[in-house]
Image (tube, rainbow, N blue to C red):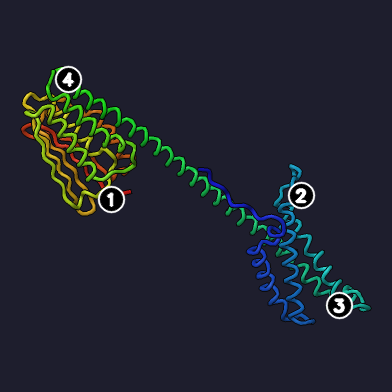
């Protein structure tokens, strides 16, 4: 998603930028106060002239901010703006005094009080206006830099989010074939052994996959849904090895609606079957515990299979992928640990934030 900069004002809106105009008129008002103490023609007359000069300065500043469109390489636009503001002060003051001279009255430069007033306004304008213009340019440049930094940060965050989404989709896509191939391999073993249960297992597998496969691409699941899948999976595995697999599921009611990445619990259980129970001649038992502890959810999958040494000490592709998925979703706020169980077996424990509701 591209970050779109706000449209800059054009035409008269840019020439008479309201915040800029208010600041200029405010400065003109403040500067008119000390001058008004000795102003011969009255303070109101001085105030009108000072405000008019402030207005003219803003107009000149805005005009040369956008015109001409192109400048010679040796002339910076900010220099042109400051010079324009400095030059418009005597020109503006001169025009004001000429227009305010009554018909038939002598020119203002022939009247001492009016000439002194003209000189005071001109000197003050030439001295103050360019510095105000420079201050405005510095603040404008700072605001532009902040806006560009914010736009860059927003765009960078968006790119990072898109990269994380792509990585998550890739990892989630890896779960699907891994899970399907393992399950189909179990059915193939039954068929090769000529088991009379092969047909029943295949029917159960088809029904199970119809429910499970659509969830492979969902962004979020709940532990209640995960437990339903795990129960169906273990029942399927029990049909394959009825004398070598026992299992039990234990879950708090408060934990059933907590959210989790899809196939989180199933990955832990499948790993216990594949690397713990299946390689063992005696088989074993799998106990699944899901409980809520305050603002945390703790999942434990305990098996009495061959243990880490019997399985070669590896965690399997499923657990490695699950660990990376958890890191992408929760950062360092989720922890997956796998440890040996005495006298035999493995304990896989997952501790993650308790997030409720279904998305």
Measured from the top left, where is residue 293 in percent x and y?
A: 19, 52
Circle number at residue 355: 1
Tags 2 and 4 touching, CB below 8 Å: no
Measured from the top left, where is residue 137 in percent x and y?
A: 65, 55
Tags 2 and 1 touching, CB below 8 Å: no
Read off the residue under disc 2. 68
- Secondary element under disc 2, as helix, strand or loop, is loop
**Which comes sooner in the sequence, label 2 or label 1?**
2
Q: Is residue 41 left or right of residue 290?
A: right
Read off the residue under disc 4. 191
**Which comes sooner in the sequence, label 2 or label 3?**
2
| Residue at 9% across, 29% down | 242
Residue closest to the eye, 113 or 179: 179
| Residue at 75% across, 76% down | 46
Residue closest to the eye, 227 or 308: 227
Rounded to the nearest whole Å, what is the CA distance between mark 4 and mark 3? 118 Å
Read off the residue under disc 3. 112
């Amino acid at each position: 998603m591209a970050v779109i900069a706000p449209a800059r004002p054009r035409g008269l809106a840019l020439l008479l930028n309201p915040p800029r105009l208010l600041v200029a008129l405010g400065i003109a008002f403040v500067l008119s106060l000390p001058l008004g103490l000795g102003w011969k023609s009255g303070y109101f007359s001085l105030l009108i002239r000072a405000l008019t000069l402030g207005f003219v300065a803003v107009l000149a500043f805005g005009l040369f901010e956008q015109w001409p469109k192109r400048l010679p390489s040796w002339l910076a636009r900010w220099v042109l703006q400051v010079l324009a503001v400095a030059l418009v002060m005597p020109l503006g003051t001169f025009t004001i005094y000429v227009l305010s001279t009554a018909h038939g009255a002598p020119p203002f430069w022939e009247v001492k009080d009016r000439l002194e007033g003209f000189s005071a306004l001109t000197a003050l304008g030439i001295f103050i206006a360019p510095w105000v213009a420079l201050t405005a340019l510095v603040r404008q440049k700072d605001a532009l830099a902040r806006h560009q930094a914010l736009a860059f940060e927003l765009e960078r965050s968006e790119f990072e989010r898109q990269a994380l989404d792509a990585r998550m989709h890739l990892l989630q896509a890896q779960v699907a074939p891994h899970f399907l191939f393992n399950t189909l391999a179990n059915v193939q073993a039954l068929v090769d052994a000529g088991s009379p249960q092969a047909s029943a297992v295949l029917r159960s597998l088809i029904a199970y996959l119809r429910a499970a496969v659509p969830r492979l691409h969902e962004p979020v699941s709940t532990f209640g849904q995960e437990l339903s899948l795990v129960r169906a999976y273990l029942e399927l595995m029990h049909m394959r090895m009825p004398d070598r697999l026992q299992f039990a599921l234990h879950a708090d009611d408060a934990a059933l609606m907590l959210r989790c990445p899809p196939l989180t619990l199933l990955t832990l259980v499948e790993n216990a079957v594949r690397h713990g129970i299946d390689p063992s001649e005696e088989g074993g038992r799998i106990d699944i515990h899901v409980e809520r502890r305050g603002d945390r959810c703790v999942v434990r999958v305990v098996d009495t299979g061959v243990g880490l040494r019997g399985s070669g000490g590896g965690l399997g592709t499923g657990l490695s992928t699950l660990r990376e998925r958890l890191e992408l979703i929760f950062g360092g706020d989720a922890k997956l640990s796998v440890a040996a169980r005495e006298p035999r077996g493995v304990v896989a424990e997952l501790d993650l934030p308790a997030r409720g509701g279904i998305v």
